[in-house]
């Protein structure tokens, strides 16, 4: 590790004076001000208020001193509740009368009572509909939950309404699973087991989710397609649009989210089904053994009343640029979304405030004469909450430029989701840079004066088994880096402040996507000094700075080699659970291991050659930098993964069972999934072999890009 | 035009001394020697002899002075006749007795009587089979021929054997059409109407095809997939292979080629069908009104006896390199195939001899101290005759490197197919370079001393309507540039000597793919002084030289703009044949015209900025060169054309009805094809709109690559 660190250290020196200035310039009080300013009003994608914030950001970025700032609109499919006919769920008696209705909105937090345009909790892109039927509880609605229901409990959901608790996986995957199982509607609820931190009061007295709160969110299964009506192409005025019913990833059955107060009523009245012990949430007492459970199952049903509309609406990205001094055609991107379900106190404005402060600090440096070697692009994305749409449309629009010219993409969604330590997910080639940088940033924690962020983080979240360094995870999805990393193969990373995963078992953070995500929840609970947000700003900003200004790109191919080895071991190990069948069907991972070895040698040789690079020769520097830049691109297969044409990265993809999670060697993983139950084992194992072959070839091909070019 | 010419002229100066030396070094007598040397024995792909030639070429390229030469093998699906059971076609009488059999081989030309391993005429990849049935004649087997048969003549070919004449379109398309129409076998013959030049004797007394000669050739419909068993990936040892029956593009019905002597027998006995006047070939007298036509149709049938085998075999590309002095990571490729159906006197060795001489001349320059700015790659491809397989596998293997680094690909198949003038097919950005270069090369024609190749060519084949310059055509396919141009988006071109298309109406050249393609046919008839081949060597070599050695890449975006305008006009004009329906379905080409206009302005601005480029600044030069290099790449859509995932160029693709022909805006063209007979006109017109939208976006995206990078 220290050897690698040295390898990148040299590059940092040249601009290190400015780096210190850049990081020191970032101020907690100003991050607070930015957050305050952009969380006063709801600013859902496609609304006037979100355009107003875009205009303000554009103006301020110009004032900060960026070379150019422009507004880039797209016309994409959005989804809103019908203002005159609210969505709700009822329990109906035998006469069809609605004997219980779920609430139409969350209780508005103090201080925001006069705010209009708070959208009530809903599942974006749910079709209209009024399905009525028996209710079946399917735990988290995961693939394994549905399999357990079917295979072990022998319960079919065909023609029934499914109720699942939020958490563990992306909600779109729950809906997809329910649809595949034949359900005619999906209700999702926040169970305190998953959205309640022990010993914490509900908002506003603490940061827990009140019983009337519920989680908004889209329920698409886009698999990276962007706007559902213009898959693969930017949604411009002249762009051809699919018919609404052909739209990519749209759910075909009504979906609606509720809080746990409402959920209790539905669950205690459902009757019939006895959930297994491992499915018991915090609400299980009432529905497993309570009196409601003995209610007359046949005479009571659940009815969903969904009136939401899909409509093509205009969204606005704000794109700001600092032109690179020497290599204007090399792009380093810092992008995060601006649209929020309501106020966006955490999601996304804690991140947007951090980007804003980064832009301000960069502007200061520009005025002092600094100009980065490469071009820096700042992006305020729109409509992330509707399926990463703003960022994906821009990626589609600029695909050629990005493919040839993008060095790295750093994502800036919510900057904080806990009060414990740093969390970084990134591509392996960024590991070393993240470690080097965090050693130059101070810990924001009380009582850690003089301690680096690296040390503070290392102490709290060591990688343990694998190595003695702070843990860095794979990128999954669920935020705007997706198109850049998974579709285009641009080195990417994200950083935020997080909770202690070992002790805090709730999902994401309790008020996630509720009306209670206010400025105050950050100011009172998550980061009263705003030093944690500053630390995140320094990480995100520092990454951008070093990627844009280092003479030699601070990307580490040796780290990629290490990760590939780990992933290959891991997938081969997983396959070994079918050791007998592996023999029967003559399946071997030899070619993949051999490719990884080859890659490892190529990476080592490359970094050795890099030591002797003549840094006075601009073409030689550019040539090796190009090899570093295009390394990530080498893992892209234009044919995409099976059934997911926009997921093109052979090493990483969002899990097919949970968009939030990253899967390594996803093609092989999916081919192996549930293979013991395959209807045609010969075909299934042939697909495993094909995927191993594709992975081995891709790793070989990536290794070739690191060898001397002629 | 002159303005553009000047724009590129500057670049040429720096290395023009060496260019003159490079062109002057090429000698007709040595081209003759190379051709003589590599046409003595049959060297079909996958045979020992073709490996021997590869080894010789490798050795000689090394001796000539290339920096590196390597052999690159792949294991691909080939197809050979069964040596112990020859293929033939019979006429059988009512008792099933074979009363006539077609010949098993072509009469061997004088001087080659003792040669073994001459493969008899066959249709490569035909499945085994013995279909027996009535024979239906379908002219050239084109889409329009089958439509005419069905719609106007009301004849079904379902369950019948189809006989078609060679010519007009790629034979694989004929077979595809026959399969779609339900035929159970296909016989292809060479009609003198298409393979006989007036006033010329058959070989060996002239260069016409003898009656016993027949055209070999593969009958695949690969659509750019490469090896049928490993579509999208190089066919290495570890590569996963499809089951043989799943192979891409394999014909499902037996196919066999015959000469016109044999064809006469089949045609005069077929009876029943009266071909329309426009279908009459040179043989029509006998089968339209001759006695055979009154034969007992019901009691005579045709039987095909096909025993060929598909087998995975090893092939060998030879790859030689000259390392670039300043930009070793920029590749200029000169590639052509080495495998031949038999001796390959014309196809491909006239081209391979030219490449050989080019390598020799480049080696001489290297010894005199020259080294090109960029890397030059020379390739001797294998298995072109089996579906462009050697070149496509190498493109798949090196896709990442080529995508990021390839400047241009110049193809070197047969260098001569006629005795009249130069023929060039290339991407529009190469037009200016071709004109500039041919002005520096002498005409090879007798009586044209002191006349440039440009003038000689201009005089014989003026572009007329469009512009006063020698005609340059679009690239189609049918040779090894396909994967480089159509799949990867690398600027590409080809040049050869050709016939006078206005007066010589035969298809390709008469002895094409027959045993009569010998060294002697070139030496005696096509190019006795070998000056025509030298001129072709100078064009191919000169293109490579200037692309590799010019400081600023000699690519012209303005020419691309002109061509795009022409193609847009042309496709819009075609659509106007449905003016009423265009209105009904609200179809407009406005967005495409607007994109072309935008591209035109971007190209103009780009070339103006190029005039003021600081050529002393290596990074600035590299940046603008990258814009020029990546211009062609910008037209690539990773999603590919509908149903043709490996044809990814939005502007150019092989015609869906004839692989040999290039179609511009192929997505739109195919959507419009036969739209008046569409079963679902609404859907069909929506597809037209979608394709216009994709084309417009792609042209806009390409324009963006030409604007200043930040």
Image (spheres, coloured by chain):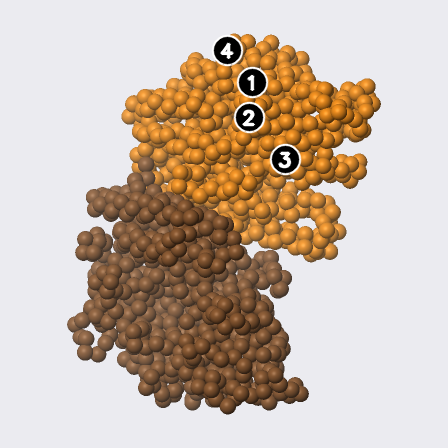
Chain colours: A brown, B orange
Please identify the quadrant where the N terminus of chain A is shown.
Answer: bottom left
Most extreme residue toward the left is: A450
Q: Identify residue for label 3.
A: B253
User: Quick one: A213 or A90, which is closer to the camera?
Assistant: A90
Give the image location of residue A147, x and y in percent.
48, 67
Kindly identify the residue that appears in the image at 44 percent across and 38 percent down.
Answer: B235
Q: CA distance from mark 3 to mark 4?
A: 34 Å
Question: In the structure shown, which secondary structural element does the residue marked by tag 1 occupy?
Answer: loop
Q: Nearer the viewer, mark 2 or mark 1?
A: 2
The chain holding disc 1 is B
Are discs 2 and 4 located on one and the same chain? yes
Give the image location of residue B592, x and y in percent.
59, 50
Question: In the structure shown, which secondary structural element does the residue marked by tag 2 occupy?
Answer: loop
Are discs 3 and 4 located on one and the same chain? yes
Kindly identify the residue that appears in the image at 41 percent across and 38 percent down.
Answer: B236
Q: Identify residue for label 4.
A: B114
Kindly identify the residue that appears in the image at 40 percent across and 80 percent down.
Answer: A193
Disc 1 residue crowd, few under 14, some 14–19, many 20+, Cα 10 Å:
many
Give the image location of residue A636, x and y in percent.
42, 50
Q: Earlier in the sequence, mark 2 or mark 1?
A: 2
Q: Identify residue for label 1.
A: B515
Q: CA distance from mark 2 to mark 4?
A: 20 Å
Give the image location of residue A579, x and y in percent.
37, 53
User: Quick one: B212 or A364, which is closer to the camera?
Assistant: B212
Q: CA distance from mark 1 to mark 3?
A: 26 Å
Kindly identify the residue that appears in the image at 67 percent across and 20 percent down.
Answer: B101
Q: Identify residue for label 2.
A: B81
């Amino acid at each position: 590790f220290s050897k690698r660190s040295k390898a990148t250290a040299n590059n940092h020196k040249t601009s290190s004076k400015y780096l210190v200035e850049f990081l020191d310039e970032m101020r907690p009080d100003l991050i607070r001000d930015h957050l305050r300013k952009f969380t006063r009003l709801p600013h859902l994608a496609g609304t006037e208020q979100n355009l107003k914030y875009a205009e303000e950001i554009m103006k301020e970025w110009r004032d900060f001193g960026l070379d150019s700032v422009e507004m880039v609109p797209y016309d994409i499919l959005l989804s809103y509740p019908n203002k005159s006919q609210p969505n709700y769920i009822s329990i109906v008696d035998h006469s069809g009368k609605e004997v219980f209705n779920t609430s139409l909105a969350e209780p508005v937090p103090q201080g925001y009572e006069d705010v209009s345009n708070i959208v009530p909790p809903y599942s974006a892109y749910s079709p209209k509909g009024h399905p009525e039927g028996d209710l079946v509880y399917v735990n988290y609605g995961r693939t394994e939950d549905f399999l357990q229901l079917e295979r072990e409990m022998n319960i079919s959901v065909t023609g029934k309404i499914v109720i699942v608790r939020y958490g563990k996986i992306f909600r779109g995957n729950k809906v997809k699973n329910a649809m595949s199982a034949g359900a005619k509607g999906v209700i999702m609820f926040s169970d305190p087991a998953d959205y309640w931190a022990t010993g914490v009061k509900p908002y506003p007295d603490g940061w827990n989710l009140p019983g009337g709160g519920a989680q908004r969110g889209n329920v698409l299964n886009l698999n990276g397609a962007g706007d559902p009506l213009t898959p693969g192409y930017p949604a411009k005025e002249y762009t051809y649009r699919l018919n609404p019913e052909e739209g990519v990833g749209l759910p075909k059955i009504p979906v609606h989210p509720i809080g746990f107060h409402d959920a209790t009523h539905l669950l205690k009245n459902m009757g019939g089904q006895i959930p297994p012990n491992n499915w018991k949430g915090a609400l299980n007492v009432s529905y497993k053994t309570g009196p409601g459970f003995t209610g007359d199952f046949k005479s009571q049903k659940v009815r969903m009343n969904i009136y939401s509309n899909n409509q093509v609406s205009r969204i606005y990205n704000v794109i700001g640029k600092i032109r690179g001094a020497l290599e204007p055609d090399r792009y380093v991107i810092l992008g995060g979304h601006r649209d929020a379900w309501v106020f966006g106190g955490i999601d996304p404005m804690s991140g947007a405030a951090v980007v804003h402060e980064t832009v301000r600090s960069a502007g200061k440096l520009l005025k002092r004469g600094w100009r980065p070697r490469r071009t820096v692009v700042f992006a305020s994305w729109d409509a992330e909450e509707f399926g990463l749409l703003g960022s994906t449309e821009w990626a589609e629009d600029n695909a050629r430029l990005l493919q040839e010219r993008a060095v790295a993409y750093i994502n800036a969604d919510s900057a904080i989701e806990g009060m414990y330590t740093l969390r970084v997910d990134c591509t392996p080639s960024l590991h070393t840079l993240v470690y080097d940088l965090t050693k130059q940033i101070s810990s924001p924690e009380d009582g850690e004066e003089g301690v680096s962020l690296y040390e503070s983080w290392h102490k709290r979240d060591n990688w343990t088994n694998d190595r003695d360094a702070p843990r860095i995870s794979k990128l999954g999805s669920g935020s705007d880096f997706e198109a850049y990393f998974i579709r285009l193969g641009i080195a990417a990373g994200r950083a935020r402040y997080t909770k202690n995963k070992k002790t805090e078992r709730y999902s994401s953070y309790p008020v996630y996507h509720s009306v209670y995500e206010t400025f105050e929840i950050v100011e009172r609970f998550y980061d009263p000094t705003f030093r944690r947000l500053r630390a995140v700003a320094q990480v995100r900003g520092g990454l951008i700075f070093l990627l844009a200004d280092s003479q030699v790109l601070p990307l580490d191919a040796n780290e990629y080699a290490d990760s590939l080895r780990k992933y290959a071991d891991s997938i081969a190990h997983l396959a070994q659970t079918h050791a007998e069948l592996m023999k029967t069907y003559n399946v071997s991972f030899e070619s993949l291991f051999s490719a990884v070895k080859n890659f490892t040698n190529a990476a080592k040789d490359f970094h050795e050659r890099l030591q002797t690079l003549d840094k006075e020769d601009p073409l030689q520097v550019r040539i090796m930098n190009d090899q570093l830049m295009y390394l990530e691109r080498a893992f892209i297969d234009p044919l995409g993964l099976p059934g997911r044409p926009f997921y093109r990265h052979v090493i990483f993809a969002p899990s097919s069972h949970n968009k939030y999670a990253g899967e390594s060697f996803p093609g092989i993983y999916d081919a192996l999934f549930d293979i013991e139950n395959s209807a045609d084992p010969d075909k299934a194992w042939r697909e495993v072999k094909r995927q191993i072959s594709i992975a081995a070839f891709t790793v070989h091909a990536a290794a070739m890009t690191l060898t001397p070019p002629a």
